[in-house]
């Protein structure tokens, strides 16, 4: 048997930050040798909210380059752009006609985002879980790395696949493979610098709430210096009354490559005036090799284009087989 296949992707909205890296990309890098990895830039998902056309293509390149700079290895992974593979959009339409509306209306993230957008909420925002299902099922993914907050999307994907298989498949010949969630290991949930009870997010209107992977050293120093803390002397983990303290200690633990016990002993008598410069220095050092590799890649347009072209070709070969199988099961006339 060959390696199991894993599918992952990140939207092109906003700049990637430490939460994206420590909570997702770094884990992809750590496990990539174990799997056949398809990693895409989710530019179709990016327009479910108002976006800036002038920056969409540039953001797409940036994320592709950051995947490589963070350590995604082309020996183990295929990197491609979602919109370059038209099967994503076509399969989404077929799934739309099979998926009950009430399945989408109960999605928690839609409810939360719809409240923020009010009357401007788009059909795309309601429907993007169906696009996500198409993303996953096109590549016959065995596993999909997700956080606990996205398990509902994998459940919907499984429900759609089961519905297709039950209606249009044969007992021993299912149309679609049923994927499983690959829940990320604990300890990499990075919280906002402005509020230790909320996840670090690209959508937060305040840039001071997050450290972006391409932030200059001075920007990192400024953000950490101004981040929310408390007046308590001494630093400790897991105090429910001190979420910011726990978040910053966890960040330092991961970026410094130390154990929780080592950090607890090192920082127990520190004040914020001593700890913040330590965290700043550690963060700058951890991001320097990523930034250096990124700027090298983004300047070599020809190389990055070749990576994405090769990724597109490989992704299309897999996706188009799945799309043809679904269309055949649904009764469509084959292309001439």
Image (cartoon, grey):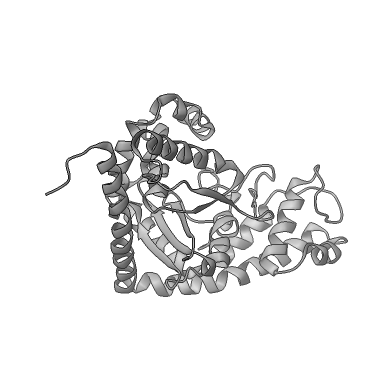
Q: Is residue 37 above or below residue 49?
A: below
Residue at figure coordinates x 41%, y 25% from the top left: 101
Q: Quadrant of residue 94?
A: top left
Residue at figure coordinates x 66%, y 57% from the top left: 224
Residue 331 spot, x, y in % from top left: 23, 37
Observer-nearest of 297 and 306: 306
Residue 303 spot, x, y in % from top left: 33, 73
Q: Is residue 289 above or below residue 218?
A: below
Left or right, 247 with respect to 22, comes to right
Observer-nearest of 325 and 50: 325
Left or right, 129 with respect to 227, comes to left
Residue 211 spot, x, y in % from top left: 58, 57
Residue 18 spot, x, y in % from top left: 58, 58
Observer-nearest of 16 and 143: 143
Q: Quadrant of residue 277?
A: bottom right
Residue at figure coordinates x 32%, y 63% from the top left: 314
């Amino acid at each position: 048997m060959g390696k199991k296949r894993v599918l992952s992707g990140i939207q092109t909205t906003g700049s990637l930050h430490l939460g994206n890296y420590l909570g997702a990309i770094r884990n992809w890098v750590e496990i990539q040798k174990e799997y056949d990895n398809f990693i895409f830039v989710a530019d179709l998902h990016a327009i479910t909210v108002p976006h800036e056309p002038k920056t969409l293509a540039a953001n797409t390149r940036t994320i592709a380059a950051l995947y490589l700079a963070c350590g995604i290895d082309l020996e183990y992974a295929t990197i491609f752009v979602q919109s370059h593979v038209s099967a994503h959009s076509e399969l989404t339409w077929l799934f739309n006609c099979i998926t009950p509306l009430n399945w989408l209306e109960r999605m928690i993230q839609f409810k939360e985002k719809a409240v923020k957008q009010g009357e401007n909420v788009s059909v795309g925002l309601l429907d993007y879980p169906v696009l996500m299902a198409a993303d996953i099922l096109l590549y016959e993914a065995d596993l999909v790395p997700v956080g606990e907050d996205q398990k509902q999307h994998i459940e919907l994907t499984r429900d759609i696949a089961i519905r297709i298989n039950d209606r249009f498949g044969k007992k021993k010949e299912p149309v679609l493979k049923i994927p499983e969630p690959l829940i990320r290991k604990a300890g990499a949930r990075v919280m906002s610098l402005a509020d230790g009870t909320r996840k670090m997010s690209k959508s937060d209107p305040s840039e001071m709430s997050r450290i972006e992977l391409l932030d200059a050293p001075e920007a990192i120093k400024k953000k950490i210096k101004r981040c929310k803390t408390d007046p308590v002397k001494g630093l400790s983990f897991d105090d429910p009354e001190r979420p910011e303290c726990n978040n910053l200690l966890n960040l330092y633990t991961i970026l410094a490559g130390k154990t929780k016990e080592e950090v607890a002993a090192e920082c127990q008598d520190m004040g914020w005036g001593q700890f913040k410069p330590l965290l700043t220095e550690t963060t700058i050092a951890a991001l320097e090799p990523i930034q250096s590799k990124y700027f090298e890649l983004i300047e070599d347009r020809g190389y990055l284009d070749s990576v994405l072209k090769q990724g597109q070709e490989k992704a299309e070969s897999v996706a188009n087989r799945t799309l043809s199988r679904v269309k055949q099961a649904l009764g469509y006339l084959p292309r001439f």
